[in-house]
Amino acid sequence: MLPMLVSCAATNKVESEATNDARFNTLISNDRTYRVQWHSLPDPIPLNEPFALELVIFENGNDDQDPLRVELAIDGRMPEHRHGMNVFPEVVRGASGSYRVSNMLFHMPGYWQLHFDITVDGVTERAQADVDLE
Ligand SMILES: [Cu+2]
């Protein structure tokens, strides 16, 4: 049986850009349902200055698909201090399927967690990233 040759050049531009672009970090959600490709703007995340996030969400383990459309909630927490941010992030989905999160602010140095809460059909799953801010 001949292997099936499929050109992937144009099938998923966002996927390949997000996967191959060194700016993007890869994050698997806690129950391994989703793969989040994300980076901050600017990168690294600045101390006490507004920043943004750009991210794309895929089904984990499926490399041949379009970015997912989900309900997305973003939060930043300092678990050791038991507090979060003093601002409310704004999430906008772009035409390419990527999400842009603005109005982020980590107001003090230390250990932060970025929470990406992804909801599909009423079920929420979290992906989280550790950020050590100096
Ligand atoms: Cu704190």
Image: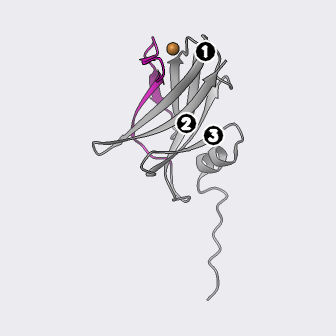
Q: Is mark 1 within 8 Å of ligand 1?
A: no
Task: Give how far apart the Cα atoms at labels 3 and 1 are.
Answer: 21 Å
Label of residue 25 in the image: 3
Callouts 3 and 1 close, C-beta under 8 Å:
no
Res 16 visible:
yes
Report helix, strand or loop for mark 2.
strand
> In the image, is residue 100 above or below residue 134?
below
Res 96 visible:
no
Q: Amino acid at mark 1?
A: Pro
Q: Magenta span covers which residues? A: 67-94
Q: Is residue 94 left or right of residue 126?
A: right
Given this view, does label 3 or label 1 mark the residue nearer the observer?
1
Label of residue 55 in the image: 2
Report helix, strand or loop for mark 1.
loop
Q: Is residue 57 left or right of residue 13?
A: left
Residue pointed to by mark 1: 109
Q: At x 46% / y 24%, what residue is drawn?
A: 79
> In the image, is residue 36 above or below residue 52?
below
Q: Amino acid at mark 3?
A: Asn
Seen from this angle, which residue lies furthest front? 80
